[in-house]
Amino acid sequence: MNLARHCNLCENEMTSLEKGLTCKLTNKNPDFNNTCSKINLDKKLKEKLEIANLELEIIHRNKKSTHLTFYSTIIIGFSLIIGGYLFSSWTIYSLFLWTVKIGIIAGGFAFLGVAYSKLNRFRKKNKKAQLEKRKIDEVLEKYGIEYSTIFDFKEKIHGTQEVTVNLEFKNWTKRQTTNTYKFDY
């Protein structure tokens, strides 16, 4: 396991261009086998844990919308391609009409490209958010810390969403934390 993952969640983390990642307490690079006996998990851990879980929750909430956009864009794209192709069944003698036909088909392919890019962007965000959460969960598992999250999404006002994130911990000195985040989407 990457020792830096432990340090990224610890309050004693210190980085510099000279030494790289070091511990404030020992002034040395991380050197431990499975867990660090001097780790100080507090504000950094809570913030990173809340943000990682919140990002994943937002992605899951937007899943239906993303898939609906994907499928509707695909349908429009194929409709344009088929419509452009069927447009050729007419006897076309004009260069202008051929240009229109090719433009319609090209527009259909453009819609297919947009649909694919939206779905691909969603998948990348989801994969990144899951990876971040998994990294934190692996470290917490080493220390025997378990948690559960509760999200309270408030009413969206002028494009700004307010969310209250409640973390409840098991097997850790902190029992519960609650923070509120605001974001635009």
Image: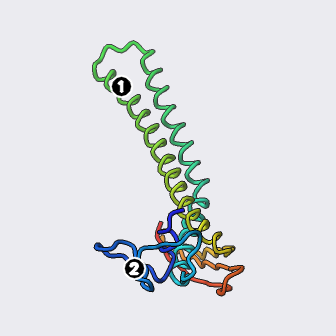
The colour mode here is rainbow
Counting the numbered discs, the total is 2
Identify the amino acid type marked 1.
Ile
The residue that disc 2 covers is: 14
Task: Decide: is 85 above or below 116.
Answer: above
In the image as oriented, which residue stretches furthest toward the right? 170
Residue 158 appears in the picture as rendered: no
Q: Residues within 10 Å of mark 2 (few under 14, many from 20)?
A: some
CA distance for labels 2 and 1: 60 Å
The answer, for residue 60, to whether it is visible in the render is yes
Task: Between label 2 and label 1, give the one nearer the viewer.
Answer: 2
Rendered-image quadrant of the N terminus: bottom right
Left or right: 125 with respect to 104? right
In percent of width and height, residue 32 lies at 53, 72
Q: In this view, does 160 lie above or below 75?
A: below
Residue positioned 42% across, 84% down in the render: 24
29 vs 154, left or right, is: left
What residue is shown with label 1? 102
Tag 2 near tag 1, CB within 8 Å: no
Vertical arrangement, residue 100 with respect to residue 144, above or below:
above
Label 1: which secondary element: helix
Give the amino acid type for the residue marked by disc 2 in the picture.
Met
Q: In which quarter of the image is residue 177?
A: bottom right
